[in-house]
Amino acid sequence: MVIESQKVTFSKSKEEIAKFASEVANFEKLMPDTVAKFEVTSPTTFKFALQGMPEFELKVIDTTANGVQLVSASEKTPFKLNLDLQSSSDNSSEGFFVFEGDFNPMMAMMIKKPISNFLGVLISKLSAI
């Protein structure tokens, strides 16, 4: 299952956005208002839980000027979350989040809307920084 957020324009370079997103503590600023827990567990890992949802742990595994790649730290729910970035000009860039997970059809149907909403909040808050 692949879910993409909408593409947005940032008033910062892709390098600045990638640097911000590579610092896991900054993800607390991007979380929805329904975040029930956020905890940095290492320089590359953080845990979070949204109200009514299970807790997830994400780890930054790669950072380049073209984006940031995170993976689930749990083998029970393996998925990837990528921030893809492109330059628009020297002082602006475009980007979007991509969620990739291997779920059975029933689970995919149940989580598609919450994940789509979550990605929408992440990209919206990231565009406001």
Image (spheres, rainbow, N blue to C red):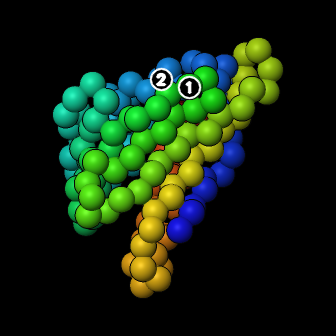
Q: Residues within 10 Å of mark 2 (few under 14, many from 20)?
A: some
Q: Earlier in the sequence, mark 2 or mark 1?
A: 2
Q: Whole-percent x and y of residue 36?
A: 22, 51
Q: Whole-percent x and y of residue 22?
A: 44, 27
**Is residue 12 or residue 81 the one in the foreground?**
81
Quarter of the view holding residue 111:
bottom left
- Residue displayed at 49% across by 70% down: 112
How far apart are the two marked residues, 2 and 1, measured between alpha carbons? 12 Å
Q: Look at the image and tell me whether residue 112 can be seen.
A: yes
Residue that badge 1 annotates: 64
Q: Please determine whether, in this image, residue 121 is positioned above or below residue 83.
A: below
**Is residue 24 or residue 124 the one in the foreground?**
24
Kindly identify the amino acid type of the residue bearing the numbered disc 1.
Thr
Residue that badge 2 annotates: 20
Farthest residue toward the right? 89
Quarter of the view holding residue 12:
top right
Q: Is residue 34 left or right of residue 112?
A: left
Q: Whole-percent x and y of residue 9?
A: 71, 34
Judge depth for marks 2 and 1 and give the one in front.
1
Question: Secondary structure under badge 1?
Answer: strand
Kindly identify the amino acid type of the residue bearing the numbered disc 2.
Phe
